[in-house]
Image (tube, helix red, strand yellow):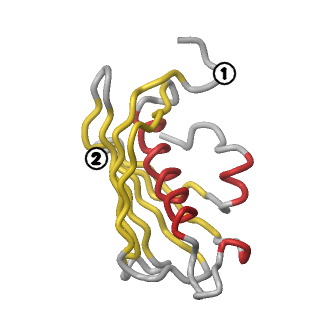
Amino acid sequence: MGFLGTGGAHAELMGAEFIDFDPASETIRMRFTVPDSFITPRGGVQGGLVAGFLDEAMGWAHVQATGGQEAPLNLEIAMTLLKLIPAGPLMGKGRVIRRGRKAIFLEGELWDESWTTLYARSTSTAIPTPVPGRAA
């Protein structure tokens, strides 16, 4: 299955790129290019922006898993920052844990470019909605 659709201006700002999607595990892998403007004086990506990268990966996992028919609307996102996230490329992984008619459970991870250092993890509870611009 190929990548369905585009992420819009915010995804472009994050330098979001599709790598692949595994339909059996409903897992997507993405690459992000961190803009210099996302880096704090401490030398790492600002925490709220980290959540944006994770949200993008989790959301696209659900979009891909539904063949482009649904997008998650977040009710709650929990995030754990494990390490300062430096400038440079990031690898993201998003996965559908459970998908029901009224609730979706997702998880996400951010890694370094070689997939050896885990920087952050997240979970999300969301509701399934039609992809914006598509009829229900």
- Mark 2 neighbour density, 10 Å: few (under 14) some (14–19) many (20 or more): few
Q: Quadrant of residue 38?
A: bottom right
Q: Which residue is mark 2?
A: 25
Would you say 72 lies left or right of 32 here? left
| Residue 123 in the image, given as x and y percentages of width and height | 33, 52
Q: CA distance from mark 2 to mark 1?
A: 27 Å
Q: Look at the numbered disc 1 and give the secondary structure of its residue.
A: loop
Residue depicted at 43% across the width and 48% down the height: 58
| Residue 90 in the image, given as x and y percentages of width and height | 53, 72
- Name, please, the residue furthest toward the bottom: 42
Would you say 31 lies left or right of 22 here? right
Would you say 10 lies left or right of 69 here? right
- The answer to whether 56 is drawn above or below residue 69 in the figure is below
Circle 1: residue type: Gly
Circle 2: residue type: Ser
| Residue 110 in the image, given as x and y percentages of width and height | 43, 68
Would you say 1 lies left or right of 32 here? left
- The answer to whether 73 is drawn above or below residue 8 in the figure is above
Circle 2 or circle 1, nearest the eye: 1
Q: Which mark is residue 1?
A: none
- The answer to whether 119 is drawn above or below residue 5 in the figure is below
Count of numbered labels shown in the rendering: 2
Residue depicted at 47% across the width and 57% down the height: 54
Looking at the image, is mark 2 or mark 1 earlier in the sequence?
2
Q: Which residue is mark 1?
A: 133
Residue depicted at 49% across the width and 68% down the height: 91
- Name, please, the residue furthest toward the top: 136
Q: Toward the viewer: 45 or 90? A: 45
Residue depicted at 66% across the width and 52% down the height: 11
Q: Look at the numbered disc 2 and give the secondary structure of its residue.
A: loop
- The answer to whether 60 is drawn above or below residue 35 in the figure is above
Q: Toward the viewer: 63 or 106? A: 106
